[in-house]
Amino acid sequence: MNTRVLPPTPQAIHEAALALQSGELVGIPTETVYGLGANALDEAAVRKIFAAKGRPADNPLIVHVARLEDAAPLCEISDTARALAARFCPGPLTIILPRRPIVPDVVTAGLDTVAVRVPSHPVAQALLHECGLPIAAPSANTSGKPSPTTALHVYHDLNGKLPIILDGGECQVGLESTVISLSGDLPTVLRPGGVTPEMLLEVLPEVRVADSVLRPLQAGEKALSPGMMYKHYAPGGVLTMVKGTQEKVQHVCRRLYSAAIADGQTACILAFEEHLAAYSGMEVLSIGRMAEPETVSHRLFAVLRQLDEQGTGRMFSEVLPAEGLGLAIMNRLSRAAGFRTIDADQEEEALSCPSRESSSRS
C-alpha cells in the first residue's frame, strides 16, 4: 500500500473521510499525539488497527467524537460526564462510561465500558464532521514504541500500512489524554495526562488516582485503559530513571554514563534545561524545563524517538515530582523505562559504605 502524507486541505480531509467510510485506516493529528483511526462501528476496520500496530487485543481503544453528545448512541452519558465535558472538552480528556451494545467488543477489549474523547485539534474536528463517524484511534505508532507527535513519526512506523496520514503539524500537548473512569462509585484517573487531577477537582468533589498509574500491571490484571501495559512508550535502548537529591542524581548519571562509555556502549543523559551544564563533555539531551513541565510533556516522546534513530544503547534520565503534570510525565517515563529506577541517595550511601548491601535498584 502506498502511504501518502497530505496537508490538511479540504480535499485531503474529504479523501481521508472516504477512506474511513470504506473501512481503511487514517493517520490523524490531535492535540495530544497522532492517532491511527478507523470507523469505530466497523469491526473489520478496527481489527486493522491492531494488525498495523502489532497491538495486543486486550488493550482497549479510545473512540473520538466531534462533541460528547455524539457519543450518546455509544454509551450512557452521565451528568458528571457532561460537567467534565463542559469544562475540558474539546481537549485532552478521555471519559470511560458504560457502553451500549452498538460498540464492537474489539473496541473495548470485551469490557462493559467504552472510552470516549472530544479532540480539540482543528484537523481532527474537521475529519469527524466530514466523515460523520465515531473514530476509534490509539496512538499511530508501532505498539510499545514512543508515541508519534509529528506526521513523519507516523510515516516512519506505519508506512505501507495505511493509505493517508493527515499532516497537522507538531502536537501541542505531546502526551496522550487523561483517562478518567466514571463507571464506578468514585471518579478514577486510570491514565494521567494534560488534564491533571488538580484540574479535575475544580469540577468534581473527589477524584481518585489509580495506584496502577505508577506501577506495572500485576499478573492477570486486565488493562482498563490504554497506556497501562508494563513496558510502553519505550525506545529501543535501555532507559534508566535516576531519582533523589539533584546533586546526587547528577553524580550518579555522570558515573553511569562514563561506565557505559567505558564498556563500549553508546549513551546519553536526559536532563532538564536548567541542569545541562552539569553534564559538560557528555552526550546530553534537554527534555524541557523542570520549572515548566508542559515543555517536558511537549518534548518527551520526540526525544525518545531521536535516541532511537541514533541507536543509543543506554539512557539515564532525571525525573520530576509525580504531581500535577509531572504525574503524567512520570507515568510515561516509568513505562518507557520498564520501571527501571535508581535511587541516587541510596546509591551514593551504599558506595560510601561498601559493607552495606545496596537496595537502591528496582
Image (cartoon, rainbow, N blue to C red):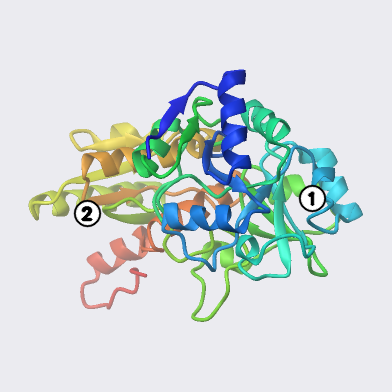
Circle 2: element type? helix
In-image side of 133 versus 136 (left or right): right
Q: Amino acid at mark 2?
A: Leu
Q: Earlier in the sequence, mark 1 or mark 2?
A: 1
Indicate the quadrant containing the C terminus: top left, top right, bottom left or bottom right: bottom left
Q: Which residue is mark 1?
A: 201
In-image side of 146 versus 353 (left or right): right
**Residue 183 against residue 21 in the figure, above or below:** below
Seen from the viewer's position, the closer of residues 237 and 202 is: 237
**Residue 295 against residue 111 in the figure, above or below:** above
Which residue appears at 20% of the width and 46% of the height? 267
Which residue appears at 43% of the width and 47% of the height? 141
Circle 1: element type? loop
> Crowding at label 2, few (<14), some or many (≥20) Cα neighbours within 10 Å?
some
Q: Which residue is mark 2?
A: 256
Residue 105 in percent (x, y) is at 65, 66
> Crowding at label 1, few (<14), some or many (≥20) Cα neighbours within 10 Å?
few
Seen from the viewer's position, the closer of residues 81 and 214 is: 81
Seen from the viewer's position, the closer of residues 326 and 22 is: 22
Which residue appears at 37% of the width and 53% of the height? 234
